[in-house]
Amino acid sequence: MMVRLYRLLTVLGGPLIALHLRRRRARGKEDALRFGERLGRTGLPRPAGPLVWLHAASVGESLSLLPLIERLSARVTVLVTTGTVTSATLMAERLPPGALHQYVPVDRLPYVRAFLDHWRPDLALWAESEFWPNLLAETGRRAIPQVLIQGRISPRSFAVWQRVPGFIGELLGHFALCLGQTEADAERLTVLGAREVRCLGNLKMVVPPLPCAPDALAPLEAALAGRPRWLAASTHPGEEAIAARVHAAVAARIPNLLTVVVPRHHTRGGAIAAELTAVVPELPVAVRSAGEVPQTTTALYLADTMGEMGLFYRLAPVVFVGKSLTVEGGQNPFEPATLGAAVLFGPRMSNFPEAARMVAEGAAWQVADEEALAEAVATLLGDPAQLARRCARAQAWMQAESNALEAVSSALDPFLAAVEAGHARA
């Protein structure tokens, strides 16, 4: 009943949806050159042979699936869809040869049907909690097998879905298999009505080290010349000001300190630069998007560029992961740990339940507030032996958790074998 009502609303709301998309396009939130893809239209031909469609919402989800995409691309053509301009840019840089990217169509039947008519996927893989009713139902109507990977149901979403059990039950009923990101996610999926549910590990902990251009790393290493430094990564509003105040507090104990700030959204760079200067006026700030390189007097380095996180993870032995002090959810703590950094984050890491296990096993350090963050940074940079132990534990923990890719690949193998067999018979 709820699915039919949703479908009716998307039909009747066509003019409002079109208006919303035009406004997003005017604000730069839609790709003007590829806008047709959001309406189910494309300029790319469908390759011959088996095609697996994998949908991820945005940057974090799509990056976490790159190792799996590489595995799949060795056997079939992989079509990756995402919904944001930033994720499209990163996928263009990071997808393996032969894999394709498209924007996911808006969840209206004409757009969905145009997309499916053109691409004719043989298997659909959905990441995390992207439950688009029309896309799910229309894909199921065409007898295309669907699998949920990295399935995630937060406690808050679980409470909401429990109020409409028929709705979520019908959506989950389209999946032949649901792979929960954690045991808790798997349990919630089962309660909500998923048929076959397993937990085989978290692919976010299998992400290969973020790339780094050697010609970018060497000049910065030379400019820093052994200075003690720490990184505030993927920061959200409020956390940049915290980083500036932490720098002021730690610099009193750690001379010649450099603080690097990489905001989650690089388009906020101008506002952040002004804020850093206003918070602690006496601290010199250098801005990467302006072509500036840290000088010996630079205190704060604002790296407001896109796609360079791998560069700064390699430069900083201590990394604070943002969206964890002023905003709820957290950002990926596994990426800096993979590169052997000592990882810090705040108390608001609900999107990464494994973060608690990282802390319990000594692979990360959770801080309660700004004062605790300053103390942690000062302690690590002032104690090389403890810093080395923390870095080693983080990297070792990540290596021990790296079996999820094999387990997920094995679970998908019967679906891939059926797809390949079907095309062989045809």
Image: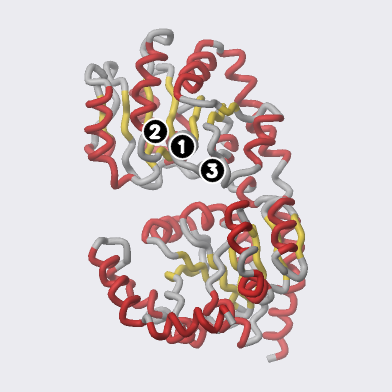
- Residue with the mark numbered 1: 322
* Mark found first going from the N terminus, 2 or 3: 2
**Residue at mark 1 to residue at mark 3: CA–CA distance:** 9 Å
Q: Can you tell which quarter of the image residue 122 is in?
A: bottom right
Q: Identify the residue position indicated by label 2 in the image.
A: 239
Disc 2, SS: helix
Residue type at tag 2: Glu
Q: Which is nearer the eye, 276 or 299? A: 276
Q: Residue at left 24%, top 36%?
A: 291
Q: Position of residue 24 (x, y in %)?
A: 29, 65
Q: Between marks 2 and 3, how big is the CA–CA gap?
A: 16 Å
Can residue 212 be seen from the camera position used here?
Answer: yes
- The answer to whether the residue labelled 1 contacts the one labelled 2, judged by CB atoms less than 8 Å apart, is yes
Quarter of the C terminus within the rendering: bottom right
Picture coordinates of residue 40, whole percent (x, y)? 42, 80
Residue position for label 3:
332
Residue visible at 66% across and 34% down in the picture? 358
For the residues bearing labels 1 and 3, Cβ distance under 8 angstroms: no
Query: Which quadrant of the structure image shows residue 9?
Result: bottom left
Query: Which numbered disc, 1 or 2, marks the residue that appears first in the sequence?
Result: 2
Q: Residue at x 42, y 10 (%)?
A: 254
Q: Is residue 383 above or below residue 212?
A: above
Viewer-side residue, 350 vs 421: 350
Q: Is residue 209 left or right of residue 229?
A: right
Circle nearer the N terminus (1, 3): 1
